[in-house]
Amino acid sequence: MKKRTLLAGAIGIAGGLGYLLWKGKPSDRPNQTTGNGKGNGVDLSSRSGQAAEDARIDKRAASMNRFAVETETDGPEVLDERGTDQAGAAEILRNVRDEAFEGSDEKLALALGRPIEEIEGWTNGAGAIDGDVLLKARGLANLRGIHLE
């Protein structure tokens, strides 16, 4: 059984090395052009045809984006589907910390998997809270029976 495994591994490694060696030499591959414009079986018109196809695809992609919605707004950044902004998220973190973790930033940091300095900054209003942290804080509040809002 071990011999078969070793043999299969050796064959796999040899195949991978063979592929890498073959991939590295474009002049040895059939029907490919090299970087100097000299081909080995393919005329250069297929290259210009590919460039035209690429340009057509780029133009189509650009036209599809003309109806894109602007994501930047002048208002506060909304972090979740409930419309919570940074101030609301900081308030939720403070409530979870005070009610579920005896007011300890260290315990909240451990529960959220974040550094203590980050938690202190967030609860003091000095950092940008992301949606993941807000989701985790809501989950902790739910598990601990804390009513937020």
Image (cartoon, rainbow, N blue to C red):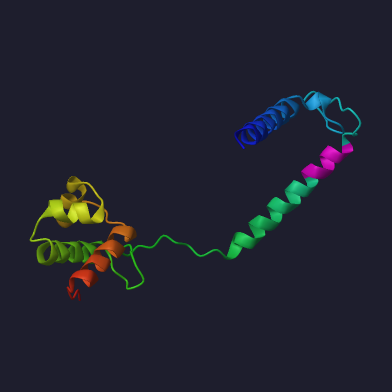
> Please, which residue is most extreme toward the left here?
102
Q: Residue at x 80, y 43 (%)?
A: 50
Q: Please state the horizontal and vertical placement of residue 51, each as a whole percent of the image.
A: 78, 42
Q: Please state the horizontal and vertical placement of residue 13, each as a whole percent of the image.
A: 65, 30
**In this picture, which residue range is highlighted in magenta?**
45-51
Q: Residue at x 82, y 24 (%)?
A: 27
In the displayed structure, 105 sits above or below 15; it is below
Q: Residue at x 83, y 40 (%)?
A: 48
User: Does the magenta portion include 125?
Assistant: no
User: Does the magenta portion include 47?
Assistant: yes
Main SS class of the magenta portion in the image = helix
Visible residue check, residue 136: yes
Q: Please state the horizontal and vertical placement of residue 115, each as a whole percent of the image.
A: 22, 46
Residue 130 in the figure: left or right of residue 119: right
Query: Where on the picture, by quarter, is residue 28?
Result: top right
Query: Where on the picture, by quarter, is residue 133?
Result: bottom left
* Count of number-bearing discs: 0
In the displayed structure, 64 sits above or below 47; it is below
Camera-side residue: 33 or 21?
Answer: 21
Q: Quadrant of the C terminus?
A: bottom left
Q: Residue at x 24, y 49 (%)?
A: 114
Q: Quadrant of the N terminus?
A: top right
Camera-side residue: 139 or 63?
Answer: 139
Camera-side residue: 20 or 49?
Answer: 20
